[in-house]
């Protein structure tokens, strides 16, 4: 497998994100291009096509993301929110009776064991697909302190679970895995 690093520094692409939200988060796209590719003589032929990149995983260094802060990434053409929950936000998520939830899931079910502070979700409202607010500092996080979709007023809590408004489901948790204490591979 050949590893293709993309460190051009554009992990956060949504318009309107303020300058201070552009944390320098190292991301890399890991694309399997097959053993035969290594033997190709022309370097440019070794670059994966846009199609292949669209399926790529990204690896993110979480070290710069402070407690209470969130970042937006772009993965497979979709926004991804990565949030470092505060102990209070974790406690708020955990005190909600799961039976009260429209889409019943615990925070533990939406995070990795021992990493409950790292909430990683798609930034795509499950109503009609708008990008909710709340990942950038100062944005409206809604009535439950998580994310707020202004399109039709969906409020998500600190575990990004739908609590109010028309969205039927929680923000989706993508497939991801920690590759070290502070690095995570999404996809
Ligand atoms: S798209 Fe988010 S509330 Fe409708």
Image (spheres, grey):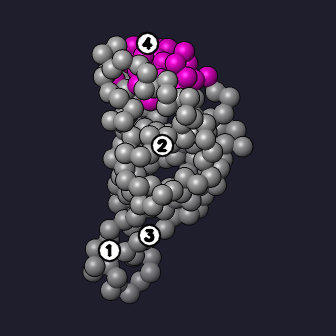
Marks 4 and 1, the one that precedes in the sequence: 1
162 is higher (above) or lower (below) than 59: above
User: What's the magenta region?
Assistant: 140-169
Q: Which mark, by number, is residue 118?
A: 2
Q: Position of residue 35 (x, y in %)?
A: 28, 79
Mark 4 or mark 3: name the one nearer the start of the chain. Answer: 3
Instruction: Give the image quarter of residue 133.
Output: top right
Q: Is residue 100 left or right of residue 84?
A: left
- Ligand 1 contact, mark 4 (Cβ < 8 Å): yes
Q: Are marks 4 and 3 in contact (CB under 8 Å)?
A: no
User: Which callout, 2 or 3, points to the residue nearer the camera?
Assistant: 2
Q: CA distance from mark 2 to mark 3?
A: 26 Å
Rendered residue at 39%/40% (across/down): 111
What is the quadrant of the N terminus in the image? bottom left
Q: Is residue 87 left or right of residue 125?
A: right
Labels 3 and 1 touching (C-beta < 8 A):
no
Instruction: Return the residue at label 4.
Output: 165
């Amino acid at each position: 497998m050949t590893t293709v690093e993309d460190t051009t520094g554009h992990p956060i692409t949504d318009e309107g994100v303020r300058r201070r939200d552009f944390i320098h988060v190292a991301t890399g796209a890991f694309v399997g291009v097959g053993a035969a590719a290594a033997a190709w003589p022309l370097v440019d032929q070794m670059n994966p096509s846009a199609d292949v990149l669209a399926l790529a995983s990204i690896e993110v260094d979480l070290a710069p993301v402070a407690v209470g802060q969130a970042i937006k990434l772009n993965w497979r053409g979709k926004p991804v929110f990565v949030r470092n929950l505060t102990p209070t936000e974790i406690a708020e998520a955990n005190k909600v009776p799961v039976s009260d939830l429209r889409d019943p899931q615990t925070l533990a079910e939406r995070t990795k064991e021992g990493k409950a502070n790292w909430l990683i979700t798609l930034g795509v409202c499950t109503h009609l697909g708008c990008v909710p607010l709340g990942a950038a500092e100062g944005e409206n996080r809604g009535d439950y302190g998580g994310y707020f979709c202004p399109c039709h007023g969906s409020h998500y809590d600190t575990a990004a679970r739908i609590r109010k408004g028309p969205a039927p489901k929680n923000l989706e948790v993508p497939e991801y895995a920690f590759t070290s204490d502070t690095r995570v591979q999404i996809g």
